[in-house]
Image (cartoon, helix red, strand yellow):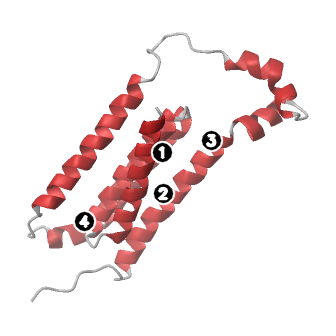
Amino acid sequence: MDAILVGLAAFLVLGSVAALEMKNLLSAVITVGVVGMGLSILFLLLGAPDIAITQVVVEVIVVTVMIRATKRTADEEAGRPRSLATVVAGIGAVLVLVGVGVAAFATLPAFGAPGRRPSDWYLSEALRATGAGNVVTSIILDFRGYDTLGEATVILVAVAGALVVARHVAGDGEEAPRA
């Protein structure tokens, strides 16, 4: 499981750097979408399904809007053929993401199977384990730290996507016109 998390984290970092360095705006937007979906799988593996669902919803909406905003640029570049390396890299990235997603779903308990009852443990042990004044405070501040980290990461991914679009709109990443 740790190897999957490390591999997925490396994939997310490399994908983020690739999105920031791409010259083609539509490719950068799609790469940001792939990174966001990988991030939702990471949240699922870390046991935060609520954040994973939020990330998927935010990612679908943001990528859809960004693709629509870049449609004119994509139409202008439609006549240019893709290189074989680009196609192979794209197919490889999708296959890796699908493989990690399948592995993540394989670790989940069967639908409808009785799960653990953490609420009993929280009620009986939370105050002793954290030293907080009440159970709600101990759960929110001490046990839900990964959720807060996840929510901050969702915002970071959205900001990175906005920076990619803003950079291209400002003309900083545009290719030189061909003669």
> For the residues marked 2 and 4, what is the alpha-carbon distance in whole angstroms?
21 Å
Three-letter amino acid code at disc 3?
Asp
Three-letter amino acid code at disc 4?
Lys
Three-letter amino acid code at disc 1?
Gln
Mark closer to the chain start, 2 or 4 = 4
Above or below, 31 against 3 in this view is below
Q: Nearer the viewer, mark 4 or mark 3?
A: 3
Circle 3 residues within 10 Å: few <14, some 14–19, many ≥20: some
Residue at 52% x, 33% y: name it. 49
Give the residue number, with chain letter if any, for mark 2.
157
Query: Answer yes or no: do the residues labelled 4 and 3 have beta carbons within 8 Å?
Result: no
Mark closer to the chain start, 4 or 3 = 4
Q: Position of residue 131 (x, y in %)?
A: 88, 34
Mark closer to the chain start, 3 or 2 = 3
Give the residue number, with chain letter if any, for mark 4.
71
Query: Answer yes or no: do the residues labelled 2 and 1 have beta carbons within 8 Å?
Result: yes
Give the residue number, with chain letter if any, for mark 1.
55
Residue at 9% x, 89% y: name it. 179
Of residues 26 and 117, the one drawn nearer to the viewer in this rendering: 117
Of residues 35 and 6, the one drawn nearer to the viewer in this rendering: 6
Circle 4 residues within 10 Å: few <14, some 14–19, many ≥20: some
Secondary structure under tag 2 reads helix
Evaluate whether residue 53 shows in this view: no
Three-letter amino acid code at disc 2?
Val
Secondary structure under tag 1 reads helix
Q: Position of residue 9 (x, y in %)?
A: 45, 48
Above or below, 144 against 61 in this view is above
Give the residue number, with chain letter if any, for mark 3.
147
Q: Which mark is residue 144?
A: none
